[in-house]
Amino acid sequence: VVALPAGVAPPHGLPLHLWVLTRPDAEAAPAPLVLLVDAVADHAADDRGGLDWPALRAAVTDAWRAFAEPDRFTEVPGLRRVVPAIDLMDDETDLTPARHLRPAVPGGQALTRLERELRDTLGRSTRLLPPLGEDPAPPPTTPRTPQQGNPGAAHWATVTIAELARAGAVELHTAHGQGAQLPAALPGDVVVPLLSGEAAGPPRVVTTAGSRPRVEGRAALLRPDPQALDPWFLAGFLRGSGNTRQASSYASRATRIDIRRLKVPRIPLEEQRRYGERFRALAAFEVALEHAATLGRQFVQGTVDGLADGTLPPV
């Protein structure tokens, strides 16, 4: 039984199981063996939606050739295993390979490397944490008046994305639905998810030339005129909770954001850049923090699996 990743055959959106059956033989061994291969976890489609066919083919055919010669078969945790057929038969028979494979527990050296990277990342996250300051004062270049009921808040004249697009200060491109694509991005472009929530992620500034942003559902790409708008300033203010709330539609379960209604302050470019540098620092801190969280989960799970598998001592 070979578990194959989505995209191998129709329907392309679903992972499939390939069963290779042999006719019963009266002279066969009394305890026939079953080869179980899980090629899903390590061979799923990449960010561009493509499969690494050579690697997938090698993983499956190597397992099959080894199974054909039992004397040279070696189990690979998380990938392949041979199990007596009788062990698979019970009241809840389930031949999904992943259910019967031993987990691929990282070895001591791998965990040591992971621990070192985690410590380095945690230290970098601490260094990247932008100082808040005891009493940050607003720049004096733009006059503001306190908002009623909140003396510490400042009020700007604002401009919407629709108005900026009409004035030529920003190009607006949108993508709707699964599989939709935005134009190839340029450094300084801003990608804005149009469905609010943690899964959608915040607006982000593109820093790699020629990349094509991955789109989950609805998104927009803003290409600001660098002589009119700072991209980090733009992304930061578009992320503001009050901004997204006033531009959102709550008519359905998913909160949709009308990109044209989002606003940014109408302030000089030099002042935009001051805010942009602060937003850029916060974004760098957030990336480091998310990477640390991912490494932390991997380290905890690897250590738990090693302790439970008996490959790591308790001290």
Image: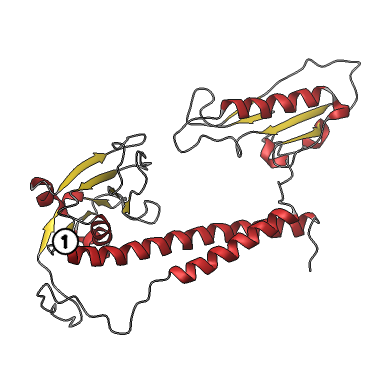
For mark 1, what is the residue? 269
Q: Nearer the viewer, residue 60 or 271?
A: 271
* Res 4 → quadrant: top right
Image quarter hosting the N terminus: top right
Residue 205 in the image: state x and y as whole percent. 32, 52
Residue name at image x 40 percent, y 52 percent: 199
Q: Nearer the viewer, residue 272 or 3?
A: 272
- Give the SS element for disc 1: helix
Where is 311 relative to 179, above or below? below
Residue 147 in the image: state x and y as whole percent. 14, 77
Where is 50 relative to 253, above or below? above
* Res 78 → quadrant: top right
From where the camera sits, is residue 89 visible?
Answer: no
Image quarter hosting the C terminus: bottom right
Q: Nearer the viewer, residue 32 or 148?
A: 148
Taking the image as shown, residue 295 lies to the left or right of residue 250, namely right
Color style of the picture: secondary structure
Where is 191 relative to 42, above or below? below
Residue 33 in the image: state x and y as whole percent. 82, 28
* Res 42 → quadrant: top right
- Check disc 1 and give the amino acid type: Leu
Badge 1: how crowded within 10 Å, few (<14), some, or many (20+)?
Answer: some
From where the camera sits, is residue 209 visible?
Answer: yes
Residue name at image x 76 percent, y 29 percent: 35
